[in-house]
Each structure stands twice: as structure tokens, then as C-alpha cells.
Image (spheres, helix red, strand yellow):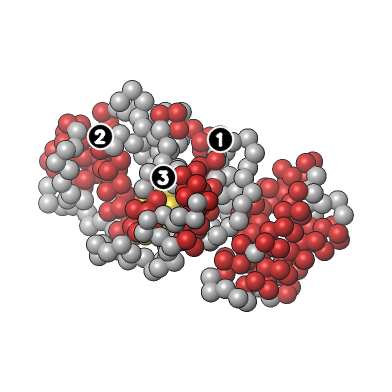
Amino acid sequence: MAKDYGAQIGRTLGWDLASYGWKPRDDAPAHVLEGHAEGKARFGTKTKRPTRFERKWLQLRQNALRREKVVDEAITPGFIEFIDYPTCPVTLVELTHSTGEDTDWSVDRVNNDGAYADGNLIVMSVRANKAKGNKSLRDIKELLADWEPLPGLSFRESFRLLSPMEKPCSAQTAQEPRNTLFTRLCRGTARTNYQNLQHILVMCTTVDSSSRNAMFRTLSVAHADAHASASLLKLAYEKLVKRIKTVDYIYDACSDDEFQTLLERWVETIPWTRKKAFDAKLESMTGGRGVPKEMLRTWALETKGRYAGW
């Protein structure tokens, strides 16, 4: 549901800027300037020194307001710290901070038609963010179908960008997509359960046999015949293990055709009576989520992430 813009939103931003000793942008709305003046009178020179997460939070809110985009109340410095990660999920480079280079970290709205909201944000490099720009998931898939990578990214990097976009950009579709997981799962970003399943199998390759067998037993309850279920799943897993030996980045192995064929067959045979419980199990095992209705409402998709009646 689209959120109405109120003067208090601007005043609160201005007040927060003043509390950290920051000045509003030159083009800031009057409400921001009013809040800043009130905050400056209150704090004077006794301002706080922001952490990099607080700096990003202030920058994000200013940029969002300039573009009339909603920043949901759930987006706090703590949330930004939660979704932070040392490396970019697209370029795989180690992220830098405030260097002015294209390796610097940035916070991106995965679905460009959504607000800055829980489930729709990801930390990636400036280079990956610029390459994505305002492109939709469909735009990127069409480019790749024509064997064209995104400008500024390699083919493999372009494919990696698809994975974090998959669920947020298809949140309103009735049937969840079932596509290859090209990169790691990103904290705080909505993902499909097929992505969760692939991630679990990748993680199985990094643990001891006891832990791995326990995971297989947990997953095999998706079918009535747990033994047959485990057998097919292990066949898929063996293909994954074989491919992992030939790649530099572990998630590249998920693109193996034989692995995907066997895994899709395993998923397709899950009885619909067990699917809901199985999906919940996958989410609990990975800490991942889809996009529940209450979350989707905060994305303001009907106004393309903008405040209503702006």
C-alpha cells in the first residue's frame, strides 16, 4: 500500500541530519530544512559521529526523498548493518568504503518499482549497481538471451545479477520461478525456495558427512517415499559435487545442466499437500523468506515505490 508523504517525514530527516552534524542537500524540501533548523538549535555542536551504517542511512534517505521514493520505517542503520557483506554478490570483489572507486559498497533497490523496504534491498558494488541501473529482470534476461552482457559486467557477472533479482521482481506472480542460483544468497533480500534448496545443497558440500546426511533426511520428508526421495536428491547432489571440482566460485556449479535436471525432477514430484510445510522448512533452514503480503504492502509497488499523491 502506497504511503502518503507527510511533513513529519521531512522534518524527521532534517532533525536526524542535524543530530549528526550533517547539512541537508541544497535541493532539500522545506520540511527537511525546518527539521534541520530545529535540530541544529537543539544539538548545537554536540553532535554524534555517525558509523558507516548511519552515514549510508542518511544518504539513502536524502537520495530517496529527492526522487520521491518511500523509505520504510524498517530501514534503519541496524538493518543496513544486517544486510552488509564483505564482498559483492555480482562481481565478487571485496567491497570498499568511501574510496570513490567502483568497488565501494552501495545499497540498491532490487525491484526498481519498489520502495526502500525490507526484502527489497541488497548491498552490492557501485560497478554492479551502475550496470543494473533502472533495468528490470526482464530487461536483463532479454540482453542475455541475445548474448549481450550488461555494460560494465562480464557475462558471468550479468548472470549472477539475476539471482538476487529473481524473487523481488516476481513477487506478485502466482507461480514462483524456479531458476539457477548463480550466486550466494543475500541477507535480508527475498528469495525463492528453489534458490534456498540449491543453497542448502551447496552448503552440504562444505560440512562433514554426519551433518550432510542429517540435511538429506530433513529434505527427504518432502516426499511420501523418503528413501526414493533421498536417492534422487543424492544423484543431483553428486552432479553438483562433481561440477564444484571444476569451478573457482562454488555457486557456478549450480549451472550444471544435469544437476538442474535432476533437482527440478525432485522438486516437481513433491506432493502439493506437503509443499507448504516443505517450503517453510527450507526457509527455516536458510533464514530466508519469500515476500509475505504484509511485507509486499511496504514496497508501494502500485506507485512504483513513490509516496502517494506527491
Q: Do callouts 2 and 3 mark residues in contact (Cβ within 8 Å)? A: no
Q: Which residue is mark 3?
A: 135
Q: Amino acid at mark 1?
A: Gln
Foreground tag (2 vs 1): 1
The numbered mark, 2 or 1, whose residue comes first in the sequence reads 2
Three-letter amino acid code at disc 3? Answer: Lys
Q: Which mark is residue 280?
A: none
Q: CA gap, disc 1 to disc 3? A: 18 Å
User: Is 204 situated above or below 161?
Assistant: below
Horizontal placement of 220 versus 197: left or right? right
| Front one among 167 and 203 | 167
* Residue 10, label in figure: 2
Q: Quadrant of residue 24?
A: top left
- Residue farthest front in this picture: 146
What separation in Å lies between label 2 and label 1 (alpha carbons)?
A: 30 Å
Picture coordinates of residue 28, whole percent (x, y): 18, 37
Q: Position of residue 81 (x, y in %)?
A: 40, 56
> For the point 34% across and 53% down, which residue is it?
130
Q: Is residue 42 visible?
A: no
- Horizontal side of residue 228 vs 150, given as left or right: right
* Disc 2/disc 3 C-alpha distance (Å): 29 Å
